[in-house]
Amino acid sequence: MILGASSFAGRPGDLKEHVESIELYIPKLGIYKGSTLEIEKLDRVLDEISIHDFAYTVHAPYSAGDLKYPSALQVDTAKMSEREFTLMEESISLAGRIGAPVVVLHPGRIGPDREKSYFSMVKNLSMLASVAEDYGVILGLENKEGTDPSNFCCEADELSRTIEAVNSEHLKATFDIGHANLTCGGDPEKLREFVQTLKKHIIHLHLHDNSGQWTEKYDGDEHMAPGEGCADFSVLKLLSGYRGVYNFEVFSLEDILFGKKTLGNAFKL
């Protein structure tokens, strides 16, 4: 089992004793001035991390309603222009440069015409999958939380259908158990069905927890340590052939340590 953590969970030196992989979370790395990538800042980040010999994954920019999210890095995969394609290719190129096998990206937002938005997203994802093929990486399309009705691909069926519509070996799924728990309303049986539907496409995992209900804070997507909410992490045992990273998408080293205990207990059940 390869354990990982998002880069915002702590400093590389503090994380190294506890995880083997780092997910470089592009929106929070501080490597952009507006929408312009500052190569010197990127190189400094990579230099700091490289001395610890981590494996890598990359989380690309996405569309976010959070006011703290950099406005110049907003990317809605259902509505992309040249600027958005450039941002995404920079993340994909970075993954190729550092040997990261997976780039996480989000599905798009539902526009006034749902069908038109959906087909635009599929077209854009097809183009991005072609770019990923050029760089030798795989895109992990993440399931989003159903507590936000503006998201595509909250349900496993729609995410699977989207991946199959693109029909590329370079577009698979990032299974986010916290988002799925919200979509399933905290129901462990529904969560199990979600995993069964999606598992053939899963190449990456995001691990965090919540109450399974909408709240004013991030639509319930609070990214708590695994075990602090109600998500049933034993459903991960359904992924018997999974060999990718178990990435803790949490905010502190303490959350990682708590999550590791939860994960260990889940696999003993």
Image: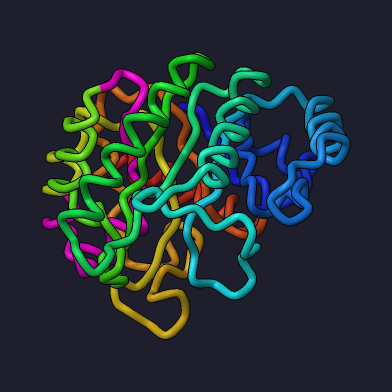
Using the image, determine if residue 203 lies above or below residue 251. Answer: above
Location of residue 171 by image quarter: top left
Q: Position of residue 144 (x, y in %)?
A: 33, 56
Tell me, yes or no, whether the highlighted magenta stretch contains residue 176: yes
Residue sitting at 46 percent across and 39 percent down? Answer: 104
**Display colour scheme:** rainbow
In-front residue for pair 1/161: 161
Which quadrant holds the C terminus? top left
Location of residue 244 by image quarter: top left
In-front residue for pair 198/38: 38
- Left or right, 24 with respect to 185, comes to right
Tell me, yes or no, whether the highlighted magenta stretch contains residue 107: no
Residue sitting at 62 percent across and 60 percent down? Answer: 251
- Left or right, 9 with respect to 132, comes to right
In-front residue for pair 225/55: 55
Q: Position of residue 53 (x, y in %)?
A: 74, 22
- Left or right, 173 with respect to 58, comes to left
Using the image, determine if residue 212 lies above or below residue 159. Answer: below
Q: Position of residue 18 (x, y in %)?
A: 65, 38
Using the image, determine if residue 210 lies above or below residue 63. Answer: below
Residue sitting at 77 percent across and 40 percent down? Answer: 12
Residue span colored magenta = 168-192
Q: Position of residue 194 (x, y in %)?
A: 16, 48
